[in-house]
Amino acid sequence: LVWSPRRGRLVNAWAADHAHNLAGATPLIALDMYEHSYHMDFGAKAGAYVDAFMQNLSWTTAEAAFTRLGA
């Protein structure tokens, strides 16, 4: 999830591989879905990895980062 000052709104964005980045936007929440991110702990269970990510996500921290942007 990024803040796009150009669009003046939050945008769900993704990068197709490690060569891409999000120019002109500020990341607020990032989830790495490459297999190397979850395979050691979750095996092929990517859904369990996402569930654990969501359970541990600090919405308070994300909100504070968003507020600091003055959006």
Image (spheres, rainbow, N blue to C red):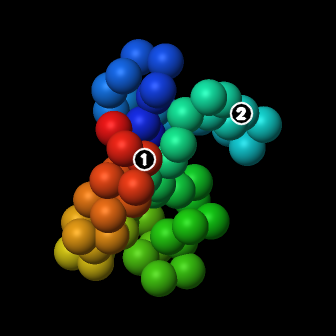
Relative depth, front residue between 2 and 56: 2
Residue 44 sits above or below residue 18 on the image? below
Residue pictured at 62% horizontal, 29% vertical: 24
For this orientation, the residue located farthest to the top is: 7
Identify the residue under disc 2. 20
**Mark 1 neighbour density, 10 Å: few (under 14) some (14–19) many (20 or more):** few
- Numbered label attached to residue 55: none
Residue pictured at 35% horizontal, 51% vertical: 66
Residue 22 sits above or below residue 6 on the image? below
Query: How much space separates mark 1 and mark 2, taking CA atoms?
Result: 23 Å
Residue 11 sits above or below residue 64 on the image? above
Q: Quadrant of residue 58?
A: bottom left
Residue 27, position as x, y percentages in the image? 50, 47
Residue 42, position as x, y percentages in the image? 41, 76
In the displayed structure image, the side of residue 38 where residue 12 appears, left or right = left
Q: Amino acid at mark 1?
A: Leu
In the displayed structure image, the side of residue 57 where residue 31 appears, left or right = right
Residue pictured at 73% horizontal, 43% vertical: 18
Identify the residue under disc 1. 69
Residue 43 sits above or below residue 67 on the image? below
Mark 2 element type: loop
**Mark 2 neighbour density, 10 Å: few (under 14) some (14–19) many (20 or more):** few
